[in-house]
Amino acid sequence: MRLPLVVGNWKMNTTPAQAEAIARDLVARLRDVHNLEVVLAPPFTSLPATAGVIQGTPLRLAAQDLHWEDRGAYTGAISHFMLEAVECTYVLVGHSERRIHFGETDHVINRKIHAALRGGLRPILCVGEEEAEKNSGRLREVLIRQIERGLDGVASSSASRLAVAYEPVWAIGTGHAATLQDAAEAHRIVRQALEHLLGEAEAFAVRILYGGSVTSVNASGFATHPEVDGVLVGGASLRSEDFAAIVRAGW
Ligand code: PGA
């Protein structure tokens, strides 16, 4: 079976000192947790401080983004080499906030996925429809396009390093999470698209996370649903008590 994966996306929050404090608290709260993977995604500048705290624990580190090239004249950008050097295991790619605020296209996202895989990182491809797309019945079309373009050219042999986060844009930071039924439907569409691209057995191994207003209250529904392999948590992941409760929601 797939090992559940719970990821905290701290977005543009935390100084290194604040990140260190949250990570310390989480390490203390999650000492005895096993049978799932817990991953923290602080901003770039807080990666080393967080890495220092979680070293030697089962917690893992993710970056929130990376550049598609290995190195070069790209002022302000961070490459997979740099992330590997500060102990990152995972990297988020194509978060809807990157798509919306930074103009990332499926093509750019695809190049980033390849950069992560070229290095030693495990990419978490984020997909999800906007509210208008949902309301006009375009969920399937949008998800299939984002998966097919985002993973274009990815070898089946890389499937074991991939994860996908289904995050409906209308659910992110709104307090309105998708219902379990809606999330499960979207996860089935994602799984089918992955099967089509990577092969059935390989697609089976890919973890599909739900993201969008996950809280310590609604997490247990997601945790016990067979189609949901984990969650990507934004706001609630900054409060260690809430995030620890999500990790302990019964995965
Ligand atoms: P949220 O964010 O949990 O604050 O809705 C989720 C995300 O953007 O990953």
Image (cartoon, rainbow, N blue to C red):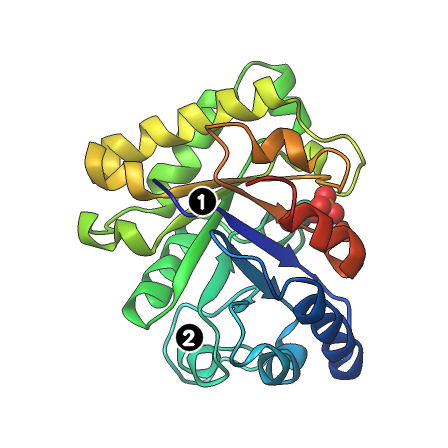
Left or right, 177 with reference to 193 = right
The amino acid type, in three-letter code, at marker 1 is Val
Q: Residue at x 35, y 67 (%)?
A: 115
The reply to whether dot 2 and dot 1 touch (C-beta < 8 Å) is no
Residue shown at 78% from the left, 83% from the top? 17
Residue 153 seen in render? yes
Ranked by sequence position, the earlier of labels 2 and 1 is 2
Q: Which mark is residue 13?
A: none
On the picture, is 14 further left or further right than 248?
A: right
Q: Position of residue 148 (x, y in %)?
A: 34, 38
User: Residue shown at 30%/42% (left/top)?
Assistant: 205
Residue 33: quadrant of the picture:
bottom right
- Nearest the viewer among 2 and 118 is 2
Secondary structure type for disc 2: helix
Q: Nearer the viewer, mark 2 or mark 1?
A: 1
Kind of residue sitting beneath label 2: His
Q: Give the image location of residue 83, x and y in percent.
A: 47, 78
Looking at the image, residue 241 sits to the left or right of residue 7; the answer is right
- Judging by the rendered image, the residue that carries numbered circle 2 is 80
Above or below, 160 against 207 in this view is below
Is the C terminus in the top left, top right, bottom left or bottom right quadrant? Answer: top right
Q: Which residue is mark 1?
A: 164
Quadrant occupied by the N terminus: top left
Image coordinates for residue 127, horizontal then vertical, percent = 51, 40
Element assignment for label 1: strand
Q: Is mark 2 within 8 Å of ligand 1?
A: no
Q: Residues within 10 Å of mark 2 (few under 14, many from 20)?
A: many
- Above-or-below relation of 85 to 141: below
Circle 1 packing at 10 Å, graded few (<14), some (14-19), many (20+), is: many
The quarter of the displayed image where residue 217 is located? top right
